[in-house]
Image (spheres, rainbow, N blue to C red):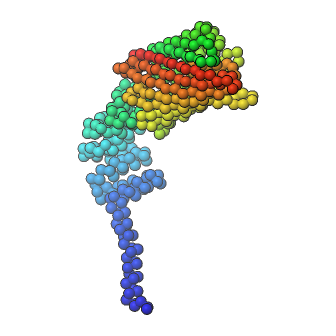
Amino acid sequence: MKASPTSAVIKIVYTLLLTLLPLAAFAQQSTTADGLFQQARTAAFEHKDYPTAIALAKQALKQSPDYTDVAVFLGRLYTWNKNLPEARVVFAGLEEKEVKDQDFYLAYASLEYWNEEENRALQILDKGLALNPQSEPLWLLKAKIYNSMNRYEEAEQAVARLLQINPSHTEGRELLVRLNDMTSRNAVGITYGYTHFDKQFNDDWQMLGLSYKRVTPIGSVILKGNLANKFGETGTQIELEAYPRISDMFYLYVGGAYSNDVGIFPKYRTGVSLNANLPKSFEAEIGYRQLYFSDQIWLYTAAVGKYYKNYWFNLRTYISPDSRNISHSYTGTVRYYFNGAQDYIAFQAGTGLSPEENRNNLLDSETYKLKTFKLGAEYNFSVKKTNLFSIGAMYFNQEYRPSTKGNQFDLSLGYTKKF
């Protein structure tokens, strides 16, 4: 049966309505303040077209002058587009309206901070925090500003307040750890290490270390003295380490040590690393370590670390090439922070020998090319922030001769006084 002309017309009209009504609704939505706001965000974030985004945001504000989110976004757009006077006009207008939104104070303070008006930024943040005392972004920005001004104690107080609100704040935890070295100008420490072998050596090893750390405007410097008893003999070593800052992102490790008691310690050792504090709470290191007994041993090191909430993850490798092969060692470390920068428990597992360990005198022989497995844990805690205690234990299973393995057990204790 053929359809009638009337029913065919109705069907065509119905199809057209289904097609055109959504388009009309979209056109209406795109001219509303919300629709214009969304278009402005798309232009800014997806296309980096700030002039178009600014025009769309201004059009949205004409329709809804009290639309705070759009006004804050317009201020941000002017900031990103380097239109600083216009940005300040927008933010000043919101300030006159006594806006309480935390995003407003964050955007306004960020503008002043990025343009080296730190004191003005702190004034804005104080107003914002009075209205939003639980704001994590505002406390984090305040800590960053104090840190940039070298006002480390105030930065530490701000980030400590942030971690009270959210103990698992990743960026806050990372910043607190970095601030830890800057808040006390001086620190003296004492460490004790005890090592027992079940097969490889008859005598247990003991090592006592004393250190003095001084924080300078360009970075920290550490002087160490070590007294060790190994193989039934006693020896001493002196060490010097420095951590000069290059920029907010980069700093160096530079270290050296000397001893007259070769075999118990290397005659001398040196090391240099470039360290980077990377975005997204990552960090990285690349460098070398060199030890000299009767011959030189060169090792190249690389490491990558990551803060995630209360955790710090790190993977480090040492590579020692020679004319025949390349020796590797790998160590993975996980820390869990409880409260401050020095309150954590750590677990470690790896293979191979490390030049940083008390056992580095074993690198004098071919044993560093043999198989070693290690597993350990460490607990650090502080008392009244200036008294730092540590206890650690490590187990090694080492192939000290081809196809011959032995076990080693390490215990370490430490105390540091900051002032």
Instruction: Indicate whether 365 appears above or below 2.
Output: above
Q: Does 320 sit left or right of 156 as displayed?
A: right
Within the image, what quadrant is residue 239 found in? top right
**Residue 323 coordinates in the image, percent (x, y):** 75, 28
Q: Nearer the viewer, residue 73 or 320?
A: 320
Q: Residue at x 33, y 52 (%)?
A: 70
Q: Residue at x 28, y 54 (%)?
A: 65
Within the image, what quadrant is residue 400 found in? top right
Q: Does 312 sit left or right of 63 as displayed?
A: right
**Residue 12 coordinates in the image, percent (x, y):** 41, 82
Does residue 179 appear anywhere in the picture? no
Q: Nearer the viewer, residue 133 or 94?
A: 133
Q: Nearer the viewer, residue 81 or 402?
A: 402
**Residue 198 coordinates in the image, percent (x, y):** 59, 18
Q: Residue at x 30, y 50 (%)?
A: 68
Instruction: Indicate whether 262 appears above or below 71.
Output: above
| Name of the residue lying farthest toward the right | 323
Q: How many discs mark residues in the rendered view? A: 0
Q: Can you say which quadrant of the picture contains the N terminus?
A: bottom left
Q: Residue at x 50, y 14 (%)?
A: 192
**Residue 274 coordinates in the image, percent (x, y):** 56, 29
Q: Nearer the viewer, residue 259 or 227?
A: 227
Q: Can you say which quadrant of the picture contains the C terminus?
A: top left
Does residue 10 appear anywhere in the picture? yes
Q: Does 125 sit left or right of 257 as displayed?
A: left
